Image: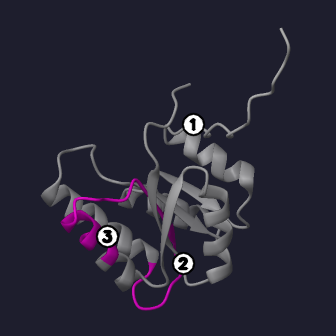
Amino acid sequence: MRLLEKMMKFLIIDDDIESCRLLEKRLERYGTCIFAEDGKTAYDQFLKAHQAQEPFDVIFLDIIMPEIDGHEVLVNIRGWEEDNLAPETGAKIVMVSAMKDTKNIFSSVREGCDNYMTKPIRKQGVIDVMQKLGYPEPLSVETPSLTEG
């Protein structure tokens, strides 16, 4: 399994701040999290990150949100990437929702998400999704033990 080469950058899009904080806690060993509480703000942050040449590695996107829902945000992001980036270089997008129905899951996959995760957010669930996206669990920083030898 390969090691992470750099700290990652995440965009967490959810109107529920508790879900954002919980996901941030699960991702803190991987990198830095930025939050957006609605689809319009999220899409603006996505564009600003690209303008600054500091794109997000992974986007966690809730489906039900005010203003623009997760499906529309996903379509907008994938459309922008298709027009502006080389193939296969866009962000990984994980849809996050309490909805477990196949209609939302299939719609999300058709629209270009890379994975789908259901709430409640569990530590092992985040680790599993990250591994499926090709990112190993970061090693814990441990202090070496001093042994006589």
Farthest right residue? 148
User: Between disc 1 and disc 3, whose residue precedes?
Assistant: 3
Q: Which residues are magenta?
A: 45-69
Q: CA distance from mark 1 to mark 3?
A: 24 Å
Tell me the residue that label 1 is attached to.
136
Q: Viewer-proximal residue, 70 or 7?
A: 7
Of circles 2 and 1, which is in front? 1
Say what amino acid the circle numbered 3 marks: Phe
Q: CA distance from mark 2 to mark 3?
A: 14 Å
Farthest bottom residue? 67
Can residue 144 be seen from the camera position used here? yes
User: Between disc 2 and disc 3, whose residue precedes?
Assistant: 2
Q: Is residue 91 above or below residue 42?
A: above
Q: Viewer-proximal residue, 81 or 71?
A: 81
Residue appearing at x 27%, y 46% in the figure:
89
Residue 75 is a magenta residue: no
Say what amino acid the circle numbered 1 marks: Pro
Residue 66 is a magenta residue: yes
Indicate the position of residue 60 as horizontal and vertical percent values: 50, 64
Indicate the position of residue 26 as horizontal and vertical percent values: 66, 58
Task: Name the image quarter holding residue 138.
Answer: top right
Tell me the residue that label 2 is attached to.
14
- Residue 8: which numbered mark, if any? none
Farthest front residue? 148
Tell me the residue that label 3 is attached to.
46
Q: Viewer-proximal residue, 26 or 101?
A: 26
Residue appearing at x 19%, y 67% in the figure:
51
Q: Secondary structure at mark 2?
A: loop
